[in-house]
Amino acid sequence: MEDNTNKAVLTKCTHCKHEMSQPLLCDHCETLNPLPSFMDFFQLMGLPRRFEIDLKTLHEKYITLSRHSHPDFHAEDEPDVMALAMTVAAAVNEAYRTLSDPIRRAGYLLELLGGPASAQDKSVPGGFLNTMLMLQEELEDARVAADAAAKARLKQVLLTQRDGLLKSVERLFADLEAAAACEATRQQQLHEIREQLNAVSFVRKSLSQLE
Amino acid sequence: MPYNEKVLDHFNNPRNMGSMDKAARDVGTGIVGAPECGDVMKLQIKVDDSGVITEAKFKTFGCGAAIAASSLATEWLKGKTLDQAGELKNTELAHELALPPVKIHCSVLAEDAVKAAIEDWKRKNAAPAETALATEEMQGKTKT
Ligand code: FES
Ligand SMILES: [Zn+2]
């Protein structure tokens, strides 16, 4: 699918004035250009703004940008270039941390698309909290009894649940992309994604207790 | 720190931990969760014929503040009418426990649990006509 979200940030290099095919790093002279304030993490990493991304591209971009914004790389430069490098390095780290993890990426993308944060919309799929409470109780029993087999089984249940939720998040994002819906439908779709992501957050918490 | 002895005690020795029979007609159960942190809370009330709460229990899988807030809430609920119980505000819990701003959502969780328990009791104990109406309403909701 064609994506043109990146076209908006194309500018000329501040150093050599060449047209840049990507934001931030000039492909002609490799000068680090100022970070446009409106740039989101997808744009920063040169990726289309969607849930399914190419992790290999993300990683390569991360390596390139990290190298070019590394303090050692700019050791001889003016203080303002040094400061810019530090800003870029921090943004690149945060972008990589967010986009490389599917749960974080989904939450970030959801809010970027105008969806609700978990503090605004706490809903979860029907019956989900009941299941969670039951699992938590079993988890507690397994912990008290130091029952390793029960813990392993519960972990498997939780992992399956998490993967299922992430699958439906992926599907919901794809649906959202596929059809230009009216605003009400769009909000409903975003709400459904939030529901799944909220559920993931409960599952993740339980999983962390098994580590 | 404005913690007093009594309040600290809710952190260290939470009251009313446990469960009641979820299926019993005089028991209302509220199960709520905070997606921000992944904590889950169950709060139950037992209501007598005159509409007074005689017993309250909770089970909280969450942080210390959420446990203290549910402990305090269950203590406070006993002897209250359902209407009085419905007026419990998370801000009162947060204030009394001197919760810092990052822990406010833990007290919100307790308030939500109380509300959900009351609603569950009302649903179970609604007169037949009201039940039909409530069901209609719910179906109407799911359709939209
Ligand atoms: S941190 Fe989530 S309920 Fe307290
Ligand atoms: Zn250049």
Image (cartoon, coloured by chain):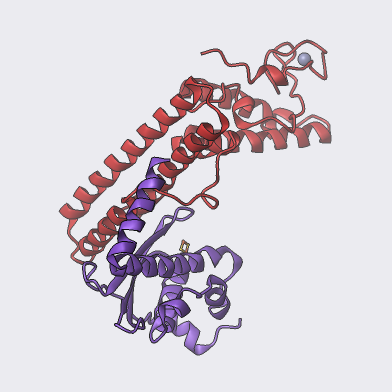
In the image, is B76 to the left or to the right of B29? right
Q: Is residue A28 visible?
A: yes
- B103 or B129: which is nearer to us? B129
Q: Quadrant of residue B115?
A: bottom left
Q: Quadrant of residue A5?
A: top right
User: Which residue appears at 57% of the width and 23% of the height?
Assistant: A61
In the image, is B93 to the left or to the right of B19? right
Q: Is residue A134 above or below residue A112?
A: below
In this view, the residue farthest toward the front is B129
Disc tally is 0
In the image, is A118 to the left or to the right of A114? left
- Chain drawn purple, letter? B
The x and y percentages for residue A164 are 31, 36
In this view, the residue farthest toward the bottom is B5
The x and y percentages for residue A150 are 17, 54
Q: Quadrant of residue A3?
A: top right
The x and y percentages for residue B50 are 33, 84
Q: Is residue A39 above or below residue A131?
A: above
- B66 or A122: which is nearer to us? A122
The x and y percentages for residue A98 are 53, 37
- A31 or A200: which is nearer to us? A200
- B72 or A72: which is nearer to us? B72
User: Which residue appears at 31% of the width and 63% of the height?
Assistant: B129
Chain A color in figure: red
Q: Is residue B29 visible?
A: no
Q: Is residue A43 above or below residue A192?
A: above
